[in-house]
Amino acid sequence: MKPFPEAPLDNPVWSSLTDAHYEACIDYGNVKFYHPDFTPFGAFVNNEDTCNAIKKHAKLLDRFFIVGNKPKVPTAFKLKKYVGLQMIIYNDIEYPISENIVELNEVHYDDLMDLIALVYPHFFKTKTNLLGRYWGIYKQNKLVAVAGERMQTKHFTEISAVATHPKYTGNGYAKQLITHTVKEIFKKDKVPFLHVDETNLGPINLYKKLGFTLRKKMHYWLITPC
């Protein structure tokens, strides 16, 4: 995989909303958000005063994030910072895939949403699955593990929603789905990356073992009314 300039990853939400996901964008000028049906993330550029955009967006959603630099917030709102690690991979993962991996579509939507509601509910919204492709593993006609794509630009695709039903962990399903997703992204001549909370040591170690490397820390600013 040839390297591409990584500058778009410094502000991944903004880069996605001005590229592959522009149709999912709510545009406040130098502040942009995903429509709430897709994901609760926004971003800004050029040291924009984000107060007006936050006031407007708060009419649509009572809890949302700005990803990147610290935003300015109106007096009626408060901030809470979370730190994520942005990780990237440029080489195929050499991990055996023994399970039947299914590309999910509208037929699988209810199964996907039921699993996400159980194990990954916070950032996954009613149309998040439309931002990219999703794959899953079924056991006894039950969806037990998933992984998919979220933020995207011309050259980069984020792996997201890596989730396994609690009763089916420890079987290597996440490793196989991540391996498969990386291969599918490479097929489109794009580079996979992902984000993970810096306190989530189990997944961080898993990603490192699979070949992901740390690129940078990302700040997620949760914005809520006071």
Image: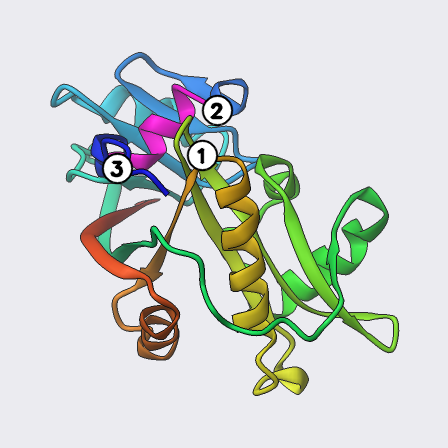
**Mark 1–mark 2 distance (CA, rounded to whole Å):** 6 Å
Q: What is the quadrant of residue 142 in the picture? A: bottom right
Q: Verify CB contact (< 8 Å) between mark 2 and mark 3.
A: no
**Mark 2–mark 3 distance (CA, rounded to whole Å):** 33 Å
**Element type at marker 3?**
loop
Q: Residue 162, how many percent across, how many down?
A: 53, 63
Q: Residue 180, how many percent across, how many down?
A: 58, 59
Q: Is residue 15 magenta?
A: yes
Query: Which is closer to the viewer, label 2 or label 3?
Result: 2
Residue closest to the eye, 96 or 150 = 96
Q: Amino acid at mark 2?
A: Ala
**Element type at marker 2?**
loop
Side of 188 relative to 222 (left or right): right
Q: Amino acid at mark 3?
A: Ala
Numbered marks: total = 3
Q: Which residue is mark 2?
A: 20
In this view, which residue lies farthest toward the top? 29
How many residues crowd mark 3 within 10 Å: few (<14), some (14–19), many (20+)? few
Q: Amino acid at mark 1?
A: Gln
Question: Residue at left 58%, top 74%?
Answer: 96
Q: Which residue is mark 3?
A: 76
Question: Residue at left 66%, top 83%?
Answer: 168
Q: Which residue is mark 1?
A: 152
Q: Is residue 110 magenta?
A: no
